């Protein structure tokens, strides 16, 4: 009998940690069984490095596996009466996000033309516009599912490399740029390729180059197909030539004929430079050039801080002489307000930084973007991708739910491929929570 009692006691003691873990309540940081302002205060102390007895499992309020300011923000919203959920996402939520990743990527892949281009909208018979910058985001989204879409992206990259301009073809004499195109399609086959205007043009040279470098780097990382990337080493150098061609004192201006150093473009250039650094180190095996790309990215951030940061927000752009491209106003959606999210979107700012939180909170205070309400004809799905990076999961869920109900069924204007891509990328981030 004593042996049985001892075994039972031992079993209870072994089970105790599991019973305790199961009873943990997200947000109950002090472990007293309730979630209140005391938990918020203790979590703040923990994040500030105090020696506390915070229950770190319960302090992981959003259930993403880490304890950071995102947990603090979510707990604060909960205590302020917001309709938010504490704890990891449910299986049903994860399935919903995965369904969006699947549906949007399938749609993006279905738009590919017979020549490999990824146009802004789909067609089997008609005329479509091909914008390489928009197509890059479609490719970046597709690369979240390389097992399904690596070949689609490879065909697009081949189209892109084939359409790089020589210095003789470019109006400003730059090698490595790329134009916007219009395609006529009949029964799914491209029958005519034209420039979108009588004279060839592009919206920018810096961003077009930067986002394509992101695609090439992600393709190499996600697929391991370094042989293909190496075969286009010279083309990668040419794309970088186009990016650096408008570099001036650490920042790029949009294109030779538009000498404005735009905040949005330079955030994308930052991402492109980091991608180039990775390509040189991990694929092209040139450590020195990798270091140079990282140094250029660091110099860009320093220049942004010096020339674009003007107190409580970034200037949306400056001319070469340093004067403002346009006076800043939160009421002016583009280029002022919308541009403030781009440092977060492309990694210039850490989402956990005080500046990122300040800019994001101010942006959300001015615009009900999660319900697709903003004074602009474009969809601006960059908002939901920024929110996912910020850990604002409630607004992400709201935006994606509205998108699923109103947009994905019809896929009409103003939906373009880049918007669907950023929706998919935001949903993909949500599927990775707690993984």
Image (spheres, rainbow, N blue to C red):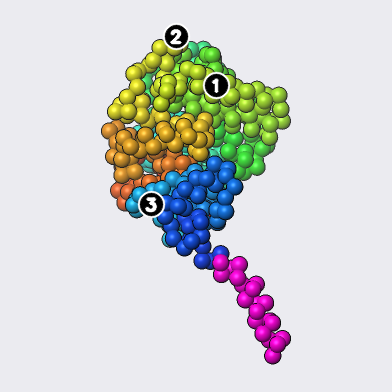
Question: Based on the displayed image, in which of its 4 quarters is residue 264 positioned?
Answer: top left
Q: Which residue is mark 3?
A: 79
Location of the N terminus by quadrant is: bottom right
User: Is 369 situated left or right of 227 in this image?
Assistant: left
Residue 181 visible in the picture: no
Earlier-in-chain disc, 3 versus 1: 3
Residue closest to the eye, 249 or 257: 249
Task: Give the percent coordinates (x, y) of residue 151.
Answer: 56, 43
Q: CA distance from mark 3 to mark 1?
A: 38 Å
Element under label 3?
Answer: helix
Earlier-in-chain disc, 2 versus 3: 3
Residue 37 visible in the picture: yes
Q: Which residue is mark 1?
A: 302
* Residue 151: mark: none
User: Is 146 situated left or right of 103 in this image?
Assistant: right
Task: Give the percent coordinates (x, y) of residue 421.
Answer: 44, 41
Location of the C terminus by quadrant is: bottom right
* Residue 321: mark: 2
Q: Are marks 3 and 1 in contact (CB under 8 Å)?
A: no
Residue bounds of the magenta highlight: 1-20
Q: Are marks 2 and 3 in contact (CB under 8 Å)?
A: no
Element under label 1?
Answer: helix
Task: Give the percent coordinates (x, y) of residue 132.
Answer: 46, 30
- Rendered position, 359 above or below 385: above
Question: Residue at (60%, 70%) from the top-left corner?
Answer: 16
């Amino acid at each position: 009998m004593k042996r049985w009692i001892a075994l039972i006691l031992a079993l209870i003691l072994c089970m105790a940690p599991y019973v305790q873990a199961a009873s943990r309540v997200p947000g109950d940081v002090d472990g007293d069984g309730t979630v209140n302002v005391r938990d918020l205060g203790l979590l703040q102390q923990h994040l500030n490095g105090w020696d506390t007895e915070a229950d770190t499992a319960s302090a992981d309020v959003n259930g993403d596996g880490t304890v950071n300011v995102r947990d603090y923000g979510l707990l604060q919203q909960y205590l302020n009466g917001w309709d938010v959920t504490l704890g990891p996402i449910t299986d049903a939520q994860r399935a919903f996000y995965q369904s969006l990743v699947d549906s949007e990527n399938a749609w993006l892949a279905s738009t590919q033309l017979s020549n490999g281009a990824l146009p802004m909208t789909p067609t089997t018979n008609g005329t479509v516009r091909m914008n390489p910058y928009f197509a890059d985001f479609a490719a970046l989204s597709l690369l979240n599912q390389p097992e399904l879409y690596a070949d689609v992206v490879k065909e697009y990259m081949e189209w892109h490399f084939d359409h790089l301009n020589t210095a003789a073809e470019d109006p400003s004499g730059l090698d490595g740029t790329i134009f916007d195109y219009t395609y006529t399609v009949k029964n799914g086959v491209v029958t005519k390729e034209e420039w979108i205007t009588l004279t060839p043009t592009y919206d920018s040279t810096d961003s077009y180059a930067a986002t394509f470098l992101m695609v090439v780097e992600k393709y190499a990382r996600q697929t391991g197909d370094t042989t293909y990337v190496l075969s286009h080493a010279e083309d990668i150098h040419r794309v970088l030539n186009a990016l650096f061609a408008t570099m001036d004192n650490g920042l790029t201006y949009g294109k030779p004929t538009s000498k404005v150093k735009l905040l949005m473009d330079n955030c994308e250039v930052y991402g492109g430079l980091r991608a180039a650094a990775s390509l040189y180190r991990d694929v092209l095996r040139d450590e020195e050039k990798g270091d140079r790309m990282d140094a250029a990215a660091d110099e860009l951030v320093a220049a942004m801080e010096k020339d674009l940061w003007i107190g409580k927000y970034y200037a949306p752009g400056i001319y070469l002489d340093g004067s403002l491209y346009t006076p800043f106003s939160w009421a002016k959606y583009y280029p002022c307000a919308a541009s403030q999210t781009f440092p977060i979107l492309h990694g210039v700012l850490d989402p956990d930084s005080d500046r990122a939180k300040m800019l994001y909170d101010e942006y959300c205070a001015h615009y009900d973007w999660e319900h697709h309400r903003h004074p602009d004809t474009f969809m601006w799905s960059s908002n939901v991708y920024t929110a996912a990076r910020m850990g604002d999961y409630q607004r992400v869920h709201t935006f994606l739910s509205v998108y699923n109900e109103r947009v994905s069924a019809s896929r009409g204007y103003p939906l373009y491929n880049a918007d669907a891509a950023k929706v998919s990328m935001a949903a993909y981030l949500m599927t990775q929570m707690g993984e």
